[in-house]
């Protein structure tokens, strides 16, 4: 892989990330009230697909960052920690301090849907093994303990199972990237592949080996983007898109549709770029991480308010709770983005710059 300092972040990918975060937030909010899409549509609009696209995006963006910055491992991991942990730890603290309240409010829904029952089980497990789950979550390695702690992937903060995946990926990806640069060190990739294959299916959803293929798709996509001239590159994502369609892989299809559109000069590319480059979508993309982290926590105060305002009308109760949850999520995400996320990202960049000098 060659270095390419001229390759820049693709702005439209921020919008894609934002849309995926909204997809997850809307789906979880609706499922709270047993509102599900028909089974046929869930094959296409499954909420898990949005998370898979997040992983592909992460593989692409992190390879771009490593290729353009060429940071040491310490500098890289510090920068990513400042990106990942501040907002997450705030959400974790809120969830840990209010776990009994969450159980009380969730139980008051008196629902029977699969999402409701699963979430109630994880909340109760969070309380019953409080300190064990809290410790694994504090270091964002809860995905490694699902065989020791029930529901460890999903306790306290339900979406954080994928954040654990992300953190595990950050710890491993510099080794992958720099091994690709050196022929004498590429044996490491074989060792990593063997370990991933041998441990595949172990632990739970939050274990890297079980989802690393999506990160690899993102990394390979960056390799294409970085090493092929623009004319050829505009067609290769289209070929990959066709492969994804044949495989009926929805996350890959979404990814390669967007990558093809954002890199090509076709009429489709122009339309997609016009849509994804709109300011509102770019802004949602910038706040996508807080949206993803806090949206399940925003459900609870909105449940309380909806119950107070509409105690006898199920329709108005649900309608208000859904709209209020999404509204509160967007507002709080904006606050967290401006006052926590952005300052901490800047601080992380400053610290990593100092580490690179030593």
Image (spheres, helix red, strand yellow):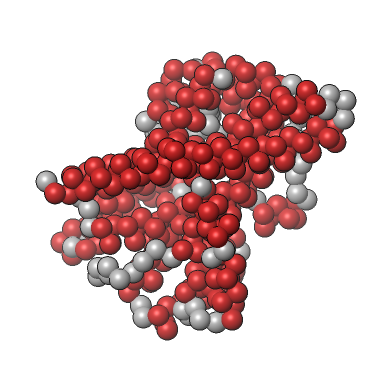
Residue 354: image quadrant is top left
Q: Is residue 207 left or right of residue 308?
A: left
Return the residue found at the far left. 358
| Residue at image point 57% right, 48% down | 21
Image mark count: 0
| Residue at image point 54% right, 17% down | 127
**Above or below, 340 relative to 21:** above
Question: Looking at the picture, how far across and down is residue 2, in whole percent?
Answer: 25, 70
**Above or below, 102 relative to 354:** above
Using the image as rendered, state which of residue 283 and residue 318 is in the foreground: 283
Residue 67: image quadrant is bottom left
Image quadrant holding the N terminus, namely: bottom left
* Residue 262 appears anywhere in the view: yes
**Above or below, 155 relative to 235:** above
Question: Looking at the picture, how far across and down is residue 325, in whole percent?
Answer: 67, 37
| Residue at image point 80% right, 26% down | 309
Using the image as rendered, state which of residue 111 and residue 358 is in the foreground: 358
Question: Looking at the picture, how far across and down is residue 33, in whole percent?
Answer: 75, 35
Question: Looking at the picture, how far across and down is residue 285, in whole percent?
Answer: 52, 53
* Residue 164 appears anywhere in the view: no
Return the residue found at the far right. 312
| Residue at image point 57% right, 71% down | 274
Q: Is residue 140 left or right of residue 293?
A: left
Using the image as rendered, state which of residue 235 and residue 329 is in the foreground: 329
């Amino acid at each position: 892989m060659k270095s390419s300092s001229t390759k820049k972040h693709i702005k439209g990918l921020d919008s894609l990330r934002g849309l995926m975060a909204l997809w997850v937030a809307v789906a979880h909010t609706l499922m709270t009230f047993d509102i599900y899409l028909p089974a046929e549509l869930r094959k296409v609009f499954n909420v898990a697909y949005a998370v898979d696209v997040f992983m592909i995006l992460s593989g692409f963006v992190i390879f771009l960052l490593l290729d353009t910055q060429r940071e040491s491992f310490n500098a890289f991991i510090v920068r990513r920690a400042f990106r990942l942990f501040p907002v997450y730890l705030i959400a974790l603290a809120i969830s840990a301090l209010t776990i009994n309240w969450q159980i009380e409010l969730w139980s008051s829904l008196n629902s029977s849907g699969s999402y409701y029952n699963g979430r109630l089980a994880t909340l109760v497990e969070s309380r019953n093994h409080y300190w064990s789950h809290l410790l694994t979550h504090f270091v964002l390695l809860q995905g490694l303990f699902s065989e020791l702690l029930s529901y460890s992937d999903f306790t306290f903060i339900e979406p954080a199972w994928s954040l654990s995946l992300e953190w595990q990926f950050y710890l491993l990806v510099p080794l992958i990237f720099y091994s690709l640069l050196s022929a004498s060190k590429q044996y490491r990739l074989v060792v990593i592949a063997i370990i991933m294959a041998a441990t595949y299916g172990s632990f739970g959803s939050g274990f890297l080996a079980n989802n690393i293929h999506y990160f690899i798709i993102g990394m390979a996509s960056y390799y294409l983007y970085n090493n092929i001239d623009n004319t050829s590159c505009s067609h290769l994502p289209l070929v990959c898109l066709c492969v994804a369609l044949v495989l009926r892989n929805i996350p890959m299809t979404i990814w390669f549709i967007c990558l093809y559109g954002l890199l090509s000069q076709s009429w489709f590319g122009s339309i997609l770029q016009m849509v994804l480059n709109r300011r509102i979508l770019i802004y949602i993309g910038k706040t996508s991480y807080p949206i993803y982290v806090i949206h399940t926590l925003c459900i609870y105060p909105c449940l309380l308010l909806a119950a107070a305002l509409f105690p006898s009308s199920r329709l108005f109760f649900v309608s208000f709770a859904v709209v209020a949850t999404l509204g509160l999520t967007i507002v709080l995400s904006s606050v967290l983005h401006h006052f926590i996320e952005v300052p901490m990202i800047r601080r992380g960049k400053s610290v990593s710059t100092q580490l690179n000098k030593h």
